[in-house]
């Protein structure tokens, strides 16, 4: 690096130094059509097995719904994939080449896994646009010195996402002033700014009206294909809407997979009925 | 260019820098040019008092940087301030030369008194100003870096972090109280004679220190403003408000915290170094946990996450403190506590928050 580039970097307040961001993994190898592998994963908290020998495979470009009663381990599973919780045993691979258990949260995020929390979490003090800007896919070197000035391509991406999440009019508002549903969308938008390969979406429609739910379903369905999307949700109408006739639904119970299949198959499964009806 | 952009829209900062500029020009004139009995004459005593306040304001800015923008409630920043002060104090001790009570050209008085026959190794180099200046930045910086690396990597945060910052400053206080540490024990370092060859008692030196303090505050403010007006500032606020969200979109939270914390500690060190020659003494009392807590009160009263609010809070409260401790000493701590409670309850955005609200509604 020449002295002038160093100097330019110092003057450029928008510059994202490597220390601010994790290393990137340019080559996610999903050549076997499977993007995420979870095999034999177990984790216990104080002796309680929250995840018990879990096996789960997510295909490239797939939209997968995961359902299960409270405490089934759905959120814990996402914690493991994103590096928040380290499992006691098992393996977790992203594509053929990335061992998720060796990475920490920022590194996994940079590798291409975005996560929406169960409780919507946005940067309340910052504006909607600033929220998206901060989440913009990483280290793009020299940003404009003037605050908020992005490169044309970045601005396009930002506006594209802004429209996609239906907040085109709200760009300048503080994120904290958005409605609950809008915050959920903004958070999904923040994930999209990272251009992730895999989106983990935990209970996206909690607190939404029916109209908002329908729009969220549309949004998530439109994301599948280009991204793989894993949605955890309790609302059965919403899941039915998402899964349609032929997408796969996975039922989690006591930390492992109880059943897997289309919505119709899962609904007819005796074990699933028992768990849900509490027999 | 960079600075102009950072100050754009920062009314408080513009006013602050303007006031500092006026002070830097007017105070020396009013002190030197006017006869002592003139109405507008500023006595040297007052100049030094003002200079002292400005260094405390710089300390408050340093605390606001980490607390206001990053949400790290540090209750140990007085430690970095005191370390900067000790580094300056050691230089000033070495400048005394053979003019001490015992007249020993090599050893400060307290070492002669302890029957030491040579300077401890960590005192070497402090006869050079450049070396002392380096240490003023490095000692607080390195300590903050090591402390922060340990604390932030293991993800200590919230109340626990506040408690260990208190423990840090308390431990340093106990250590510096010990004579064997070689920093003058509970008497600390004092009886300074000159700084860079200038007599510390002379009016001109005192004015020089005042001007240096004002410049340090202005530069420290600008540094913090430039850092916080750019992308880094937004990342800090993001970490403050939703740390795990920031982590899950790929930011290395601990590195950001570590960098900002270290810069802040260095600013505190500079503040301490300018404070010491103006008050004429540095002793372990400066490490007292209460001091660090007071700084947080200044920032809260002035208004968090504004930087200029920290300056206002530090000046207002320290002025009040000087007044109360002279007139009604027994009332001071109650007044401070009461003020803190009132501001927290009634003015969550501090004194400057009041003005900002007016501005916004006008
Ligand atoms: N950090 C933790 N410490 C102790 N127990 C935990 C921890 N995290 C999760 N658990 C427990 O593990 C179990 C699974 O929790 P998890 O949050 O994964 O369930 P979930 O399927 O997401 O439930 P919900 O539908 O209510 O969100 C629960 O019994 C929970 O109490
Ligand atoms: Mg959950």
Image (spheres, coloured by chain):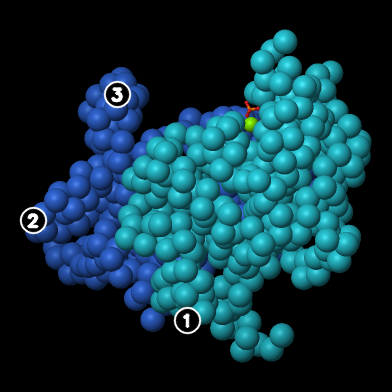
Chain colours: A cyan, B blue
Ligand 1 under 8 Å from disc 3 Cβ? no
Marks 2 and 1 share the same chain = no
Of the pair A176 and A42, the residue shown nearer to us:
A42
Name the residue carrying label 3: B338
Q: Position of residue B104 (x, y in %)?
A: 67, 53
Which image quadrant for residue B116?
A: top right
Of the pair A80 and A66, the residue shown nearer to us:
A66
Residue B86 in the image: above or below residue B223: above
Of the pair B266 and B254, the residue shown nearer to us:
B254
Which residue corresponds to the image point at 11% horizontal and 58% vertical from the top-left?
B40
- Mark 1 surroundings within 10 Å by alpha-carbon count, few (fewer than 14), some (14 through 19), many (20 or more): few
Which image quadrant for residue B123?
A: bottom right
- Mark 3 surroundings within 10 Å by alpha-carbon count, few (fewer than 14), some (14 through 19), many (20 or more): few
SS at badge 1: helix
Name the residue carrying label 2: B39
Farthest residue to the left: give it: B39
Residue B228 in the image: above or below residue A67: below
Residue A127 in the image: above or below residue A137: above
Q: Which mark is residue A152?
A: 1
What whole-number distance in Å separates the C-alpha atoms at marks 2 and 3?
A: 35 Å
């Amino acid at each position: 690096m020449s002295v002038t580039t160093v100097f330019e970097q110092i003057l450029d307040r928008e510059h994202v130094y490597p220390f601010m961001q994790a290393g990137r993994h340019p080559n996610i190898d999903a050549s076997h059509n499977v993007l995420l592998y979870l095999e034999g994963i177990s984790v216990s908290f104080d002796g309680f097995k929250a995840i018990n020998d879990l096996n789960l495979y997510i295909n490239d470009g797939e939209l997968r719904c995961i359902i299960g009663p409270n405490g089934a381990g759905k959120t814990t599973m996402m914690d493991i994939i994103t590096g928040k919780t380290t499992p006691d045993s098992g393996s977790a691979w992203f594509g053929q080449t990335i061992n998720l258990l060796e990475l920490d949260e920022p590194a996994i995020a940079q590798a291409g896994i975005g996560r929406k929390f169960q409780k919507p979490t946005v940067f309340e003090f910052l504006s909607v646009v600033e929220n998206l800007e901060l989440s913009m896919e990483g280290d793009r070197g020299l940003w404009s010195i003037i605050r908020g000035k992005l490169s044309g391509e970045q601005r396009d991406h930002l506006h594209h996402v802004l429209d996609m999440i239906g907040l085109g009019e709200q760009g300048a508002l503080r994120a904290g002033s958005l409605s609950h549903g809008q915050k959920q969308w903004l958070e999904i938008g923040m994930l999209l700014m990272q251009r992730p390969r895999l989106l983990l979406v935990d209970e996206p429609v909690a607190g939404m009206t029916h109209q908002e739910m329908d729009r969220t379903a549309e949004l998530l369905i439109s994301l599948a294909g280009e991204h793989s999307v894993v949605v955890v949700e309790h609302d059965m109408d919403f899941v039915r809407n998402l899964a349609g006739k032929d997408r796969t639904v996975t039922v989690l119970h006591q930390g492992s997979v109880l059943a897997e299949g289309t919505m119709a198959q899962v609904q007819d499964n005796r074990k699933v009925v028992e768990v849900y009806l509490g027999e | 260019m960079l600075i102009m952009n950072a100050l754009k829209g920062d009314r408080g900062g513009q006013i602050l820098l303007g006031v500092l500029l006026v002070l830097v020009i007017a105070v020396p004139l009013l002190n030197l040019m006017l006869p002592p009995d003139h109405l507008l004459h500023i006595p040297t005593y007052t100049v030094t008092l003002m200079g002292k306040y400005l260094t405390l304001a710089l300390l408050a800015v340093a605390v606001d940087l980490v607390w206001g923008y990053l949400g790290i409630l540090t209750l140990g920043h007085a430690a970095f301030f005191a370390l900067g002060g000790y580094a300056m104090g050691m230089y000033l001790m070495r400048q005394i030369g053979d003019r001490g009570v015992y007249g020993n050209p090599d050893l400060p008085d307290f070492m002669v008194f302890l029957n030491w026959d040579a300077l401890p190794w960590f005192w070497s180099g402090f006869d050079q100003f450049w070396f002392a200046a380096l240490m003023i930045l490095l000692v607080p910086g390195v300590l903050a870096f090591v402390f922060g690396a340990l604390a932030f990597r293991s993800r200590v945060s919230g109340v626990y972090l506040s408690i260990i910052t208190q423990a840090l400053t308390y431990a340093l206080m106990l250590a510096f109280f010990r004579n064997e540490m070689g920093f003058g024990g509970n008497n600390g370092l004092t009886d300074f004679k000159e700084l860079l060859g200038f007599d510390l008692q002379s009016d001109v030196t005192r004015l020089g220190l005042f001007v240096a303090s004002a410049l340090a505050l202005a530069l420290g403010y600008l540094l913090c403003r430039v850092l916080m007006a750019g992308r880094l500032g937004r990342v800090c606020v993001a970490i403050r408000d939703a740390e795990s969200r920031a982590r899950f979109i790929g930011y290395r939270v601990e590195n950001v915290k570590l960098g900002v914390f270290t810069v802040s500690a260095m600013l505190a060190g500079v503040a301490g170094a300018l404070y010491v020659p103006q008050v004429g003494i540095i002793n372990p009392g400066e490490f007292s946990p209460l001091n660090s807590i007071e700084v947080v009160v200044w920032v809260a009263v002035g208004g968090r996450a504004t930087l200029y609010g920290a300056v206002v809070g530090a000046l207002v409260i320290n002025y009040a403190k000087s007044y109360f401790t002279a007139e009604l000493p027994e009332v001071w701590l109650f007044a401070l506590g009461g003020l803190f409670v009132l501001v927290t309850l009634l003015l969550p955005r501090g004194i400057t928050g009041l003005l900002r609200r007016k501005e916004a509604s006008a």
